[in-house]
Image: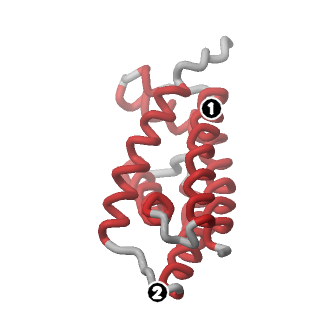
Amino acid sequence: MKGPIALFVAWALHDVEEAIMFPGTCDQLADRTGIESLRIDTRQSWAAVGLMGVLIAFLCSRGSRTEGESRLYRAAIAGLEAHVGTHLAGSVVQRGYTAGVVTAVPVMLPGTVMARRELRRRGTPLTRRDYVNGFALLVPAAIVCQAIARMVPRNVR
């Protein structure tokens, strides 16, 4: 199966942009809202991406081992595909660039589409339940990764 590999590679490439640019996006949000706890530094950003990478690697390996039958892998495809929309929506709301939006459509979307189409060719297309599961899995995972990453001491300037 090529879908799990394509999904992981797309996620990794996309998240490099996110990790690099996320501190700036968080600074913009903190400046606009006055909520200082929204700020994150580069080390914390990379820590969050690294933690999520462990999860995404696990989910993709489950997809490979089960030939796409794993509910967790299916949730990852659906959730990451929907995540493309969150990047676009975030940039519309911010009225400008937000971390990850540049690679969401040209990198992340093709990876998810390839994985989704592979499931469809195998006779097991994604369902609404897979999208619900993707939301239920990846949103809390992202929050937990961010919370743990914020425990990493900030760089002192």
Q: Tell me if mark 2 has few (under 14), some (14-19) or many (20+) residues whose alpha carbon lies within 10 angstroms of its own.
A: few
Residue at image location 67% in from the left, 53% down from the top: 12
Tell which of 3 and 61 is nearer to you: 61
Q: Give the number of the mark in front: 1 or 2.
A: 2
* Contact check, label 1 and label 2, Cβ < 8 Å: no
Q: Is residue 55 above or below residue 44?
A: below
Q: Is residue 140 above or below residue 149?
A: below
Looking at the rendering, in which quadrant would you find the N terminus?
Answer: bottom right
Q: Tell me if mark 1 has few (under 14), some (14-19) or many (20+) residues whose alpha carbon lies within 10 angstroms of its own.
A: many
Q: Is residue 35 left or right of residue 50?
A: left
Query: At numbered mark 1, what does the secondary structure look like: helix, strand or loop?
Result: helix
The answer to which of marks 1 and 2 sits earlier in the sequence is: 1
Q: Is residue 156 above or below residue 22?
A: above
* Residue type highlighted by circle 1: Ala
Query: At numbered mark 2, what does the secondary structure look like: helix, strand or loop?
Result: loop
Residue at image location 35% in from the left, 29% down from the top: 33
Residue at image location 58% in from the left, 64% down from the top: 108
Residue 90 at x, y = what percent? 41, 51
* Residue 76 in sight here: yes
Q: Residue reaching furthest top?
A: 156
Residue 50 at x, y = what percent? 64, 39
Rendering colour mode: secondary structure
The CA distance from mark 1 to mark 2 is 38 Å
> Toward which corner of the image does residue 134 lie, by quadrant?
bottom left
Residue 61 at x, y = what percent? 62, 58
Task: In the rendered structure, find residue 47 and report the number of the disc placed on it.
Answer: 1
> Toward which corner of the image does residue 114 lie, by quadrant?
bottom right
Residue marked by disc 2: 123
* Residue type highlighted by circle 2: Gly
